[in-house]
Image: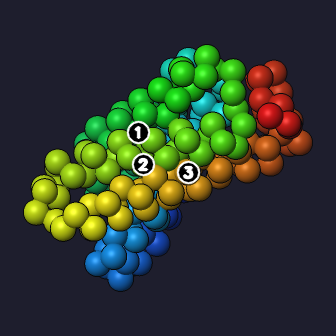
Amino acid sequence: MGVAVAIFWMAWTLIYETLSPLLRPFALNYFLAGMWYLGGTLAAYIIRKPGAAVFGELMAAAVEMTLTHWGFLALIWGLAQGLAAELVFLLTGYNRWDKFTMMVAGALSGIAAYILDYFFYKYSGFTGWYITAGVIFSAVGGALGSGLLAVIIGRALIPTGALEGLKIREKD
């Protein structure tokens, strides 16, 4: 699953890199970044066991680091994003898999990624509105691009039989 997400990320990187220069002045590029948190949310939504979010995000990041220009940094961000999503599932006792919970996990992954960006790329010199917009767009992008999308993908896979034997079910 992580490999499939990483291959998707390779294509998404092309879209992101094309649109990002136009969106960056308004921090809207962070809305597009939400797709990069999908490895953790999708794995957790389908597998529904402790550690699935971290493992899924790390596996996707490990493949991504070989396919994109982010290299080893992808693993660091993947770990932070996976841990953030994992925290949400831990707090629910690994028993809530509804859209809201998934979107919170995606949003928290986005906030974790933004925090890393803030320190790594030295955002402290940015204006307050830009930092606030970046956090908001990263959270909203994560909620939609990884939280809600994980539910959509997971539910779409159920009828194929590919998820036979896993805890995922059609209605959560």
Up/down of 43 relative to 144, above or below: above
* The label number, if any, that marks residue 112 in the structure image: none
Whether residues under marks 3 and 2 lie with C-beta atoms below 8 angstroms apart, the answer is yes
Q: Secondary structure at mark 2?
A: helix
**Residues packed near mark 1 inside 10 Å, few (<14), some (14 to 19) or many (20 plus):** many
Up/down of 57 relative to 34, above or below: above
* The label number, if any, that marks residue 110 in the structure image: 2
**Residues packed near mark 3 inside 10 Å, few (<14), some (14 to 19) or many (20 plus):** many
**Residues packed near mark 2 inside 10 Å, few (<14), some (14 to 19) or many (20 plus):** many
**Quarter of the view holding residue 92:** top right
Residue 9 visible? The answer is: no
Picture residue at 36% right of the left edge, 33% below the top: 79
Task: Calculate the distance from the C-alpha at mark 3 to the C-alpha at mark 2.
Answer: 8 Å
Up/down of 67 relative to 166, above or below: below
Look at mark 3 in the image and give the residue it sits on.
143
Picture residue at 27% right of the left edge, 67% below the top: 130
Horizontally, residue 167 falls left or right of residue 15, namely: right
Q: Secondary structure at mark 3?
A: helix
Horizontally, residue 29 falls left or right of residue 153, namely: left
Horizontally, residue 121 falls left or right of residue 76, namely: left
Picture residue at 42% right of the left edge, 48% below the top: 110
Picture residue at 79% right of the left edge, 44% below the top: 155
Three-letter amino acid code of the residue under disc 3? Ala
Up/down of 9 relative to 115, above or below: below
Three-letter amino acid code of the residue under disc 2? Gly
Q: Secondary structure at mark 1?
A: helix
Three-letter amino acid code of the residue under disc 1? Gln
Q: Position of residue 44 (x, y in %)?
A: 60, 31
Look at mark 1 in the image and give the residue it sits on.
81
Of the residues under marks 1 and 2, which one precedes in the sequence? 1
